Amino acid sequence: MHEDNLPRDPHRPYEDVMAMLLGTLFVSLGVTFYTHVVLLTGSTAGMALLLTYASEAAGVSSLGFGAWFFLINVPFYYLAIKRMGWSFTLRTFVAIGLVSLFSELTQRWVQFEQVPILYAAVMGGALMGIGMLMLFRHRTSLGGINILSLYLQQRYGLRAGYVQLGIDGVILLVALALLPPDRVAYSVLGALILNLIIALNHKPGRYTGES
């Protein structure tokens, strides 16, 4: 049977809540891996990490990743409201708030004595990719570039993962001015893993779940 003829099975409210909690926890744990070994990711999360590292390097009191992440996403809510609707925007606002909160709490809950940088890059990227995929499938994003990527996929059929991969590449190039080349190289590996998870599993028409 062609997927267009399949009966719709909308997500239940408890399924949306579970996906939002688990998705944001996965992303927050991935961010914790990255901050521990000083790696970078893309999108607004990458911008927040860049500002956190730059503040620390300059000896300025940093707001921390959670606060930067929340503030950077504020301007993108307008696009979300105009293009994706209030329901999507409210879900995204809650998800951003949860990642901001969980990322700060996870750094207190989880303590690493020693984490190989390669493992942190791979596992951190995978955790963030899986978490974002869960959110995407429940009509939720983490703001910023995620909103733009989802809009372009919805409007023009461009895969969200590939759009985000291109933008993330620009962010990682900027990071060369702040981080050592080896850290940027590992960050690129993590970004590839993150975006490939989304690109291969969030194709237009593949997933029919609705919220």
Image (tube, grey):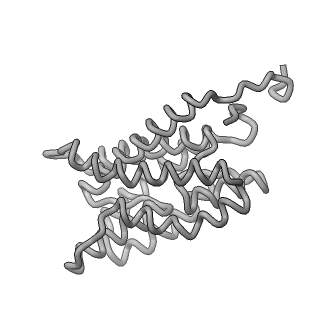
Residue lying at 41% horizontally and 46% vertically, measured from the top left:
27
Q: Is residue 80 above or below residue 105?
A: below
Q: Is residue 10 above or below residue 74?
A: above
Q: Is residue 145 above or below residue 56?
A: above
Image quarter hosting the C terminus: top right
Q: How many marks?
A: 0
Residue lying at 49% horizontally and 32% vertically, measured from the top left:
18
Quadrant of res 67: bottom left
Residue lying at 47% horizontally and 61% vertically, measured from the top left:
42
Q: Residue furthest left?
A: 113
Residue lying at 30% horizontally and 44% vertically, measured from the top left:
119
Is 104 situated left or right of 137 in this image? left
Image quarter hosting the N terminus: top right
Q: Position of residue 120 (x, y in %)?
A: 30, 47
**Is residue 85 or residue 1 the one in the foreground?**
85
Q: Position of residue 98 (x, y in %)?
A: 42, 48
**Is residue 95 or residue 174 the one in the foreground?**
95
Q: Position of residue 53 (x, y in %)?
A: 29, 69
Is 15 situated left or right of 9 in this image? left
Q: Position of residue 47 (x, y in %)?
A: 43, 67
Is 27 situated left or right of 83 in this image? left
